[in-house]
Image: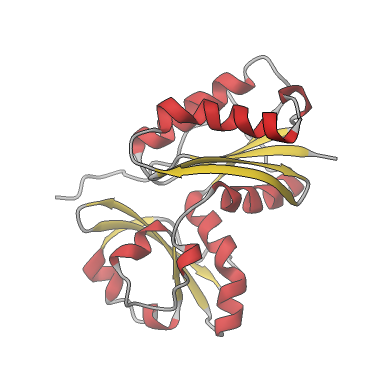
Amino acid sequence: MALFLAIETAGTTCGAALFQNDILLAEHSLYIKNVHDSVLATLVKQLFEITNFRLEELNTVCISAGPGSFTGLRIGYSFVKGLLFGTEIQLVEVPTLYACAYAAKEFALICGCESIYAIIGSHKDIIYAQKFTKYSEPQNKVRLISVAEFSALEDVNESVICGSGAIVVPNIGKQLSGLNRLTPRFIGKLGLSLIQRDMYSNIGNAEPLYSQDFVVK
């Protein structure tokens, strides 16, 4: 039975979830700003304690790869690189917006929507946004866009809107509150799919997807 850990630090949420194959065994997360560096290791340790597993039994770590908070992503990656150093545990980097859309695909099908927009706040009135099909297949690359530009997109009101950035557009599209706060279980769900496709990363070369190639003024 494969045991894997999912880590989320791309936004305000700091959390970890432990899976055995497709079964979520336990999940700890905090929705508190600026605590990632002080609590992440403790959250992970508690997961192993309450489930009676040992780190040596872990097969894979799935990490939320961004885009998102520069500091949060850096903390997550630093922790995971330290955790995996000198072990045979494998790494899977999970695109954060893709994870949001993957979690939302069932809701999209229920609503009869053809598209999913996953969005995460960047700064001021700028968000990261990416469009997906109703089956969570990426339709374009991650881009930085203003809230006003996003709200004016032609099909946005007929689409599912998910991700932590949805809070800035509460009256747009089809939304479900449970899909608007990113949790480590979202990272684990998509992470399992990537594991099954052998989409592993080299730990030495792993870097977050900051997705900010320019400065918005």
Q: Nearer the viewer, residue 14 or 160?
A: 14
Horizontal relation, residue 157 to residue 105: left or right: left
Horizontal relation, residue 172 to residue 50: left or right: left
What residue appears at the point 78 percent right and 46 percent down from the top-left corner? 21
Query: Residue 112: horizontal and vertical position, in percent?
Result: 56, 85
**Colour pattern:** secondary structure
Q: Nearer the viewer, residue 171 or 200?
A: 171
Image position of 20 with respect to 108: above or below: above
Extreme front residue here? 50
What residue appears at the point 76 percent right and 37 percent down from the top-left corner? 3
Q: Nearer the viewer, residue 201 or 78?
A: 78
Image position of 164 with respect to 70: above or below: below
**Quadrant containing the N terminus in the rendered view:** top right
Extreme top residue here? 86
Query: Residue 142: horizontal and vertical position, in percent?
Result: 41, 55
Query: Residue 14: horizontal and vertical position, in percent?
Result: 46, 40
Query: Residue 193: horizontal and vertical position, in percent?
Result: 70, 52
Tag count: 0
What residue appears at the point 42 percent right and 36 percent down from the top-left corner? 73
Q: Quadrant of residue 88?
A: top right
Q: Nearer the viewer, residue 153 or 7?
A: 7
Image position of 58 with respect to 100: above or below: above
Extreme right residue here? 1
Q: Is residue 202 visible?
A: no
Q: Is residue 27 visible?
A: yes
Q: Quadrant of residue 202?
A: top right
What residue appears at the point 80 percent right and 39 percent down from the top-left corner? 2
Horizontal relation, residue 153 to residue 22: left or right: left
Q: Quadrant of residue 164?
A: bottom left
